[in-house]
């Protein structure tokens, strides 16, 4: 394990600021290093447009399986056209290293808003945000695309609009893949429930009690409680986004 970490430190170093790739994209800063990719802010030197650039980790690029996976991620993004999902721009390979460029979404992610800026979300605000997020999930699931990583760091707020980023774990399935399809659908629904729970806890003022559950700590309408229970699998799980939409609309009505 130590040797593997050492290799990552030696070979997976981020590109230096100022490096220009493909005679067009100037690296401004490294935003982060994920499990198999490095993400940068870059500027198109021809148009001065900011973009996000993703690089397959050099240690991963040595493996055929990882190169194929990265190309699948690129293909997935190419197939998506939604105003609340970063648009694919282009991809290229330089000296055996694979990269792709996508639209940059301005704004803060939900993790930043909740845990660093301490922004509170009322029940109504939380449910309205979930409504926008469900719009995106509905679009993806109609195309049998499952994000599989709907978490607060991957949900952006852009001038009041919710955007979903980071499709590194996403997968598009066929209707024949019944078992995996149902599993990934439930995973996305569970992630929606956890996200809603984080938002609702932003207004919680009480002391966290040992072994207390959200059902004991949060004061919610029965409609919001039912929505959460079904998303989290505490009660009969949702089978389709349409059912979530119905209950979400009832929950919004219950708090207005």
Image: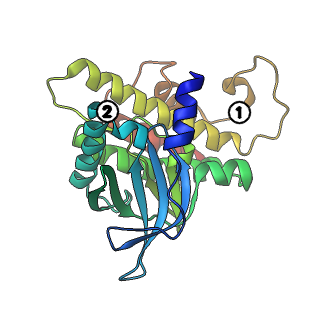
Residue corresponding to mark 2: 63
Q: In this view, does 45 lie above or below 100?
A: below
Q: Nearer the viewer, residue 213 or 104?
A: 104
- Evaluate whether residue 212 shows in this view: yes
Q: Position of residue 154 (x, y in %)?
A: 50, 48
Q: Nearer the viewer, residue 251 or 61?
A: 61
Mark found first going from the N terminus, 2 or 1: 2
Q: Give the residue displayed 36% in from the left and 50% down from the top.
A: 136
The quarter of the displayed image where residue 240 is located = top left
Q: Residue furthest right?
A: 207
Disc 2 element:
loop
Residue corresponding to mark 1: 218
Q: Nearer the viewer, residue 106 or 12?
A: 12
Q: Where is residue 152 in the image (x, y as percent from the top left)?
A: 56, 44
Q: Is residue 75 above or below residue 229?
A: below
Q: Residue furthest left?
A: 176
Give the crowd class for mark 2: few <14, some 14-19, many >=20 residues within 10 Å. Answer: few
Q: Position of residue 44 (x, y in %)?
A: 39, 75
Q: Is residue 225 above or below residue 212?
A: below
The quarter of the displayed image where residue 183 is located = top left
Disc 1 element:
loop
Q: Give the residue displayed 28% in from the left and 22% down from the top.
A: 180
Picture mark count? 2
Q: Give the residue displayed 43% in from the left and 51% down from the top.
A: 164
The reply to whether dot 2 and dot 1 touch (C-beta < 8 Å) is: no
Q: Position of residue 247 (x, y in %)?
A: 43, 37
Q: In which quarter of the image is the N terminus?
A: top right
Q: Give the residue displayed 30% in from the left and 58% down from the top.
A: 82
The image's colour scheme reads rainbow
């Amino acid at each position: 394990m130590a040797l593997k970490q050492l290799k990552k430190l030696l070979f997976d170093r981020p590109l230096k600021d100022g490096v220009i790739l493909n005679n067009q994209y100037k690296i401004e800063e490294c935003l982060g290093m994920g499990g198999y990719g490095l993400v940068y802010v870059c500027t198109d030197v021809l148009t001065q447009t900011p973009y996000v650039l993703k690089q397959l980790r050099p240690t991963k690029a040595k493996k055929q399986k990882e190169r194929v996976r990265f190309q699948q991620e690129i293909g997935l993004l190419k197939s998506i056209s939604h105003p609340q999902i970063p648009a694919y721009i282009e991809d290229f390979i330089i000296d055996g290293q694979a990269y792709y460029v996508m639209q940059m979404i301005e704004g803060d992610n939900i993790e930043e808003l909740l845990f660093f800026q301490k922004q509170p979300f009322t029940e109504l605000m939380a449910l309205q945000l979930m409504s926008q997020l469900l719009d995106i999930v509905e679009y993806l699931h109609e195309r049998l695309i499952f994000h599989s990583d709907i978490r607060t760091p991957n949900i952006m707020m852009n001038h009041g609009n919710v955007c979903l980023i980071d499709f590194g774990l996403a997968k598009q399935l066929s209707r024949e893949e019944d078992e995996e399809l149902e599993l990934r659908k439930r995973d996305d629904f569970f992630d929606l429930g956890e996200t809603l729970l984080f938002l609702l806890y932003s207004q919680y003022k009480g002391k966290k009690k040992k072994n207390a559950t959200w059902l004991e700590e949060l004061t919610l309408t029965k409609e919001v409680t039912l929505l959460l229970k079904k998303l989290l699998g505490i009660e009969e799980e949702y089978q389709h986004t349409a059912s979530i939409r119905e209950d979400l609309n009832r929950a919004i009505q219950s708090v207005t």
